[in-house]
Image (spheres, helix red, strand yellow):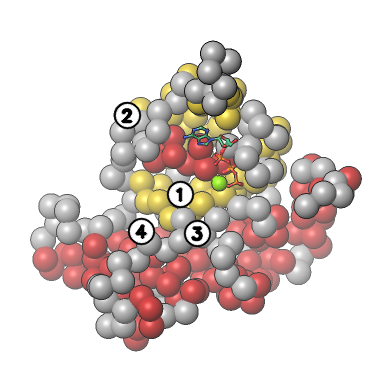
């Protein structure tokens, strides 16, 4: 049921159509017939081909865009505009270059009615959780790409969101940094207990981090498959990656997305 108390997020029969470029022609359907729920505390990954509407869905959930049909609920409330209880992280960290890491983490709290003591406590807690205490007085340009993404996560968690949306936050990083950051994010997210929706093209990332994976079709994007991951080590993607079931799931996803019979890139 949409808005049921256990669901942190629910989409009910959601479609998003955009005006078509060609004048007078039919609307362009980015996504349609989308219904799914994310339970409180769950980590769900959304995978699908480029252009199938993944970022469109995140924008609808964050309240940055409105569905053409259907309804989105966050924490049981219909989304009617930008939602301050939702944290959003992108490939680009969007840290403010003139602020120290500590002041960047604090940024989202400044517009909220939170006392100074509580604000400082939250900032220090997230810096610790994201292993940034030692780097807190540095500026963004003095950090590596992985450290910057950890700072962006700390800033996102400091607002104590009901839901965190991650739109390919690891995709600009090299393979090794990415693996380490997967583990760092998984630990932080598990420790905070926050509900998470991750968009990724990286199938191994989906399998090693998520509790459940939703697979989307080519445009117009629909959910074509739902996979319960059911693997141990929620907080250790590197340990998960070597499990036989993880490899099976990756092979299965590879097949589901028709990557085995595509030759173009
Ligand atoms: N504001 C907009 N106006 C018109 N078309 C749009 C708009 N936003 C997205 N689209 C179109 O909707 C489709 C889905 O876009 P979206 O960015 O959601 O895809 P995606 O799955 O995130 O792709 P990628 O994996 O490449 O990031 C695309 O064809 C895109 O061009
Ligand atoms: Mg996208």
Return the residue at label 2: 80
Label 3: element kind: loop
Is 156 placed above or below 11 here?
below
Label 1: element kind: strand
Distance from Cα at disc 1 to Cα at disc 2: 17 Å
Distance from Cα at disc 4 to Cα at disc 2: 21 Å
Whether residue 6 can be seen here: no
Residue at horizontal 57 percent and vertical 22 percent from the top: 22
Left or right position of 245 against 80 = right
For label 3, the crowd category at 10 Å Cα-Cα, with few meaning under 14, some 14 to 19 and many 20 or more, is some
Distance from Cα at disc 3 to Cα at disc 1: 12 Å
Eye-nearest disc, 3 or 1: 3
Return the residue at label 4: 156
Label placed on residue 91: 3
Residue at horizontal 82 percent and vertical 53 percent from the top: 251
* N-term mark: 2 or 3: 2
* N-term mark: 4 or 2: 2
For label 4, the crowd category at 10 Å Cα-Cα, with few meaning under 14, some 14 to 19 and many 20 or more, is many
Is 179 placed above or below 255 here?
below
Eye-nearest disc, 2 or 3: 3
Return the residue at label 1: 165
For label 1, the crowd category at 10 Å Cα-Cα, with few meaning under 14, some 14 to 19 and many 20 or more, is many
């Amino acid at each position: 049921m949409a808005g049921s108390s256990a669901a942190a997020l629910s989409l009910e029969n959601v479609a998003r159509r955009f005006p078509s470029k060609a004048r007078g022609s039919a609307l362009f359907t980015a996504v349609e017939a989308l219904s799914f729920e994310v339970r409180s505390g769950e980590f769900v990954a959304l995978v699908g081909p480029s252009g199938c509407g993944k970022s469109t869905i995140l924008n609808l959930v964050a309240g940055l865009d409105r569905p053409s049909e259907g309804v989105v609920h966050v924490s049981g409330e219909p989304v009617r505009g930008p939602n301050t209880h939702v944290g959003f992280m992108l490939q680009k960290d969007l840290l403010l270059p003139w602020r120290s890491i500590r002041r960047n983490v604090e940024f989202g709290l400044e517009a909220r009615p939170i006392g100074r003591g509580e604000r400082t406590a939250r900032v220090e807690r997230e810096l610790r959780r994201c292993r940034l205490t030692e780097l807190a007085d540095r500026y963004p340009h003095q950090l590596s790409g992985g450290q910057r993404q950890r700072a962006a996560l700390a800033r996102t968690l400091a607002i104590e969101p009901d839901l965190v949306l991650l739109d390919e936050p690891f995709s600009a990083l090299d393979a090794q940094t990415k693996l380490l950051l997967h583990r760092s994010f998984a630990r932080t997210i598990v420790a905070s207990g926050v509900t998470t929706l991750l968009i990724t093209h990286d199938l191994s990332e989906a399998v090693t981090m998520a509790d459940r994976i939703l697979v989307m079709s080519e445009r117009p994007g629909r959910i074509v498959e739902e996979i319960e991951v059911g693997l141990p080590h929620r907080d250790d993607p590197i340990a998960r990656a070597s499990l036989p079931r993880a490899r099976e799931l990756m092979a299965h996803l590879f097949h589901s997305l028709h990557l085995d019979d595509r030759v173009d890139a």
